[in-house]
Image: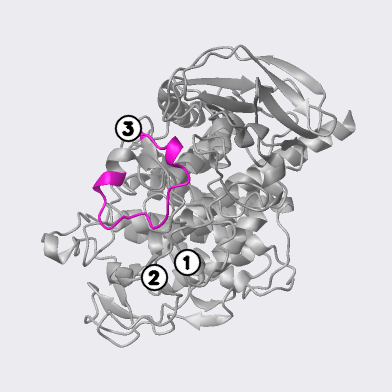
Amino acid sequence: MKHCLLLLVLLPLSLFSQEPRTDYIRINQLGYLPAGVKVAVWGSMANDALRSFQLVDSASGKVVFNGTAGKAYGSYGPFHQTYRLDFSAFRTPGVYYLKTGNTQSPVFRIAADVYKGAADFCLRYMRQQRSGFNPFLKDSCHTFDGYTLYGPMPDSTHIDVVGGWHDASDYLQYSTTSANAAYHLLAAYRDFPAVFADQYAANGLPGSNNTADVLDEARWGLDWLLKMHPKDDWLFNQIADDRDHKGMRIPKEDNFYGRGFERPVYFCSGEPQVQGVKYNKMNKSTGVASTAGKFAGAFALGYALLKDTDPGYAATLLKRAATAYALGVKKPGVQQTASVLSPYIYAEDNWTDDMELAAAQLYAVTRKQMLLKEGWKYAVQEPVTPWLGADTASHYQWYPFINIGHYEMAKQTNGAQQQQLIGYYRTGIDRVWQKAKQNAFFRGVPFIWCSNNLTTSFAIQCYWYQQLSGDASYAALAQANVDWLFGCNPWGTSMVYGLPAYGDTPVDPHSAFTHLGHYPIDGGLVDGPVYGTIYNSLIGIRLNDPDEYAPFQSSLVVYHDDYGDYSTNEPTMDGTASLIYLLALKENEGRKGSVKQAKK
């Protein structure tokens, strides 16, 4: 395993024994909230049985809690037998480890502040993803963007769309993922403002500016989205295409699109566009509402948060929210992304959720009853996000991975309509639960490409459902998805680069920053595990180093901390933005618990 020397202190002594190790205890490496669900997973490669476990104070060696292992969940991934080790009843803050026989877990904390600063830490990755001026590199890139395709203007017309975020380890830029990211950052500030610090200026360089860093970052995204919707009837969908994938490089000026350093800017035409020339395919675009709705939702929320501090800018956001929404109404359907060399695209198939969110947010700031009626019309067309409970889906087929519109609409309604929306959430969660309850990791999220993004969104949906309904039935399921991201998974690794600093986290992601520049990509959420069948079918994947997680791979699912594996170990901007919301939620949960404890 890896990482800093401190981890050697945390590793179970059995690793250094002569006997081959057969059982492991997987934990949330960030730790556990005193009043929260606290569960680890024990897995055996030898089909052993387990009756009990102990929670041990790491300083004194004293057993502070004895637990019963309970139900045997059977095989999962590399393990022949698994159990859930539930110590939720123990609430005393401290540093502990779990023990079963000769096996013990790494140490972990129980404390109200285990998530403190985690959301801000992940903002480091968002700043590193900036296009235009990049504060991490203290240099500018992609300053010639770009020339238009598929638009009402002549092809190759120059338009200034410099800015925004690179999508992942490549340098493509998508309106859909960027609008969703901006929305999550704005919502995180709206819902949990006390969580975020002010340590960076608007340009991303160190220095406070009396604005929370998360709001600075969201505004960086909004600035670019305004450029991508410069006129009432002009809306652009992406910058660059998969010609970007010629090789790893630190972001600079790309000169392989045929017009010097300019990159193509694809218009939202609402009609099929190229999807891999040699495959003789076109994507399945049918309209623009999937993109337009995301723009409108982000702009309307931006207006709500900025109207008092920057009324002129906010007024522009509100105007563009209205024009984007109008485009979505005029051209219902999906605008999928384009590719030139390969068949891989963001193959989004749903759009009514985006328009529902747009209507809900516009209603929240205008109070026009027509918008509430239209939002409801969109809401009932997609009661449950289709991937929930499914075993597979195409790449980004149901995006975003959570129906945010249901949450925002439910806050604007009451009575039977509100209960119906809450019921939609419950139905989707329960579909996942029916699968999750059959394994010790409570894993019901499918292992498709970007499974960590789905995991993050699903956890948020569980928490939003609990907030709206007051029903805590799925609290353990929600926490299991959070725990999965931070080490309670078959590989025992966090899926976030550098978080926690003392833990087992990715060190060799599919990223030019780390591979070429040896720069950290602090806070980046990697794509996550995929089904073995998916991994074996992808083009151009090869591992460049021995697989340190080889004992924990299985025919069911694989994860590799190797820069050659773009399917499981590539960080994504939009997934990280969603994680920032989730981590802010968890830090806020700890803050509230700490206040309650102090009052006692």
Q: Is residue 404 visible?
A: yes
Note whether 448 is above or below 199 in the view shown: above
Circle 1 packing at 10 Å, graded few (<14), some (14-19), many (20+), is: some
Look at label 2 and name its amino acid. Answer: Met
Look at label 1 and name its amino acid. Answer: His
Pointers 2 and 1 in contact (CB under 8 A)? Answer: yes
Q: How many marks?
A: 3
Q: Tag on residue 248? A: 2
Measuring from the top left, give residue 18's x and y in whole percent.
59, 31
- Residue at image coords 13%, 60%: 279
- The CA span between labels 1 and 3 is 33 Å
* Res 253 quadrant in image: bottom left
Where is the C terminus found, in terms of image quarters?
top right
Pointers 3 and 2 in contact (CB under 8 A)? Answer: no
Give whichever of 480, 473 is nearer the camera: 480
Q: Earlier in the sequence, mark 3 or mark 2?
A: 2
Give whichever of 116, 466 is nearer the camera: 116
* Residue stretch in magenta: 535-556
Residue 289 falls inside the magenta stretch: no
- The CA span between labels 3 and 2 is 32 Å
Give whichever of 218, 434 is nearer the camera: 434
Q: Which residue position is annotated with label 1?
A: 515
- Residue at image coords 48%, 52%: 526
Note whether 87 is above or below 254 in the view shown: above
- The CA span between labels 2 and 1 is 8 Å
Instruction: Between label 1 and label 3, give the one nearer the viewer.
Output: 1
**Residue at disc 3, secondary structure:** loop
